[in-house]
Image (cartoon, rainbow, N blue to C red):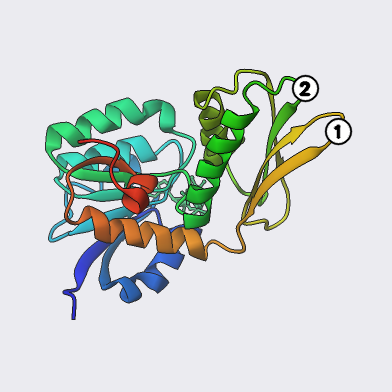
Amino acid sequence: MPATNNLVLVGYGKMGRLIEQLAPEYDFAVTERLDEYNNVDGAGIPALRNVDVAIEFSTPETAPGNLKKLAETKIQAVTGTTGWLDRLPEVEQAVRQAGTGLVWSPNFSVGVAVFRKLTALAAELMRDQKEYGAWAWEIHHDTKKDAPSGTLVHLVKTMQESGYTRGIDVSSSRAGKHPGTHEIGFDSAADTITLRHNARSREGFARGALQAARWILSHKGVYTFEEVLFGPRSAS
Ligand SMILES: NC(=O)c1ccc[n+]([C@@H]2O[C@H](COP(=O)([O-])OP(=O)(O)OC[C@H]3O[C@@H](n4cnc5c(N)ncnc54)[C@H](OP(=O)(O)O)[C@@H]3O)[C@@H](O)[C@H]2O)c1
């Protein structure tokens, strides 16, 4: 039987609570929960002891500070918080300087990781098909704080990096309880191609984050969830 590892939850909202429920299936014992009350400006992190890994799902404003403090406290981490990636370089630097490990992803669904690879291929094939225009759209529940979603931003970047340099119409909707749909489309006078990923619930994100947490127990450096699934791109 695999040994049980100690897990700290940084951010105890919808995702943190769901990860706590599923943690025993991944041989994790949740030993601490940090939230906006006991972790103002990351103040709860330096006092943590006997932690094997932390999973961080908080807010765009608090994630970079939390991740830098986790690195300084020599704690391996996984983060799914979105809307802060302009600050990724400073977080990467802190992790490398500390010699710890971090997995980050705006989306911990295995299906979305595959969807992004399909998007890259479609964008490459459409690169020179000038009669087609492209769009990128997403919908989420009305409490989601950032728009467009981190996943959509990543998909659009993927299209551009795959050689699709024409305009991409990007839009977002926020309504009801929707767990998340992402869509990439190409349209011409002759036809339409639509690639769509529907999340049925948050469970897939929570399971992906727990899978990444097990993986980072034995890795140092900065990785995306795709590297966890499909293998590291190069030494991080
Ligand atoms: N990567 C993925 O697969 C994935 C999937 C789902 C969600 N997400 C992202 O993950 C993040 C959290 O999502 P969620 O649905 O769990 O949101 P949520 O229910 O709003 O939970 C976020 C929690 O973090 C708390 N928080 C605020 N300041 C904090 C601090 N200093 N330290 C620790 N926690 C603090 C928030 O408190 P207050 O509400 O009082 O501020 C809230 O309880 C969002 O950025 C969301 O977009 C990513």
Residue drawn at the location 24% of the way across and 35% of the way down: 234
The residue at which mark 2 appears reads as 131
**Image quarter (top left, top right, bottom left or bottom right) of the C terminus:** top left
Vertical side of 131 occupied by 122: above or below? below
Left or right: 100, with 19 as reference point:
left
The 10 Å Cα crowd at callout 2, few under 14, some 14 to 19, many 20 or more, is few
In this view, the residue in front, 233 or 217, is 233
Residue 24 occupies quadrant: bottom left
Q: Can residue 13 be seen in this view?
A: no
- Element class at badge 2: loop
Vertical side of 9 occupied by 230: above or below? above
On the image, the x and y values in percent for residue 56 come to 35, 50
Q: Which amino acid does label 1 sit on?
A: Ala
Is there CB contact under 8 Å for labels 2 and 1?
yes
In this view, the residue in front, 185 or 224, is 185
Left or right: 132, with 157 as reference point:
right
On the image, the x and y values in percent for residue 89 come to 31, 26
Q: What residue type is labelled 2?
A: Glu
N-terminal of the pair, mark 2 or mark 1, is 2
Q: Is residue 161 visible?
A: yes
- Element class at badge 1: loop
Residue at mark 2 to residue at mark 1: CA–CA distance = 9 Å
